[in-house]
Image (cartoon, grey):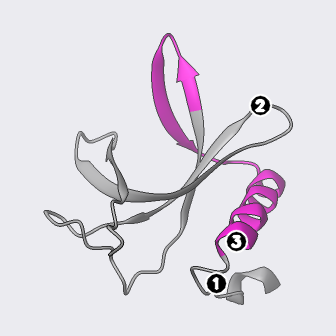
């Protein structure tokens, strides 16, 4: 029997509110920048939020020994990294391509 042990992280937003996410994948690009792809989880449980389907992609930053996550502001960088994650995760998830026409 396979045990599913998700990698759950807690992120504190600028208002001090905690949010839990399941980490699906991590990558490092050729410029040694690190990225993380995750999805929200239900509050108080380890169940993945099935109806959202929202893949959240953030850059992992380290400063003064602290690790924090930040949004990817550059659209080209976001699209490039998002494409890598989608390709790597395509066997586990179906992705909606509706935003590609914008």
Residue 102 visible in the displayed image: no
**Quadrant hosting residue 79:** bottom right
- The location of residue 53, given as percent across then percent down, is 47, 80
Is residue 3 in the magenta section? Answer: no
Q: Which mark is residue 32?
A: 2
- 39 w.r.t. 90: above or below: above
Q: Is residue 19 left or right of residue 22?
A: left
Q: Residue 68: where, in percent of width, then height?
A: 47, 32
Bounds of the magenta span?
61-89
Categorize mark 2 by other alpha carbons within 10 Å: few (<14), some (14-19), many (20+). few
On residue 95, the disc is: 1
* Dot 2 and dot 3 residues touching (CB under 8 Å): no
Q: Viewer-proximal residue, 80 or 76?
A: 80
Q: Is residue 39 left or right of residue 27?
A: left
Q: Earlier in the sequence, mark 2 or mark 1?
A: 2
Contact? badges 2 and 1 (CB < 8 Å): no
Mark sitting on residue 86: 3
Give the x, y percent position of residue 22. 39, 60
Q: Are marks 3 and 1 in contact (CB under 8 Å)?
A: yes
């Amino acid at each position: 029997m396979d045990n599913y042990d998700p990698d759950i992280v807690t992120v504190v937003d600028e208002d001090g509110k905690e949010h839990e996410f399941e980490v699906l994948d991590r990558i490092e690009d050729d410029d040694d920048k690190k990225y993380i792809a995750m999805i929200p989880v239900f509050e108080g449980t380890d169940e993945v939020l099935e109806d959202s389907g929202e893949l959240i992609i953030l850059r992992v930053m380290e400063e003064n020994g602290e690790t924090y996550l930040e949004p990817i502001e550059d659209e080209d960088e976001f699209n490039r990294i998002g494409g890598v994650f989608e390709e790597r995760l395509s066997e586990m998830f179906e992705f909606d391509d509706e935003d590609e026409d914008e």
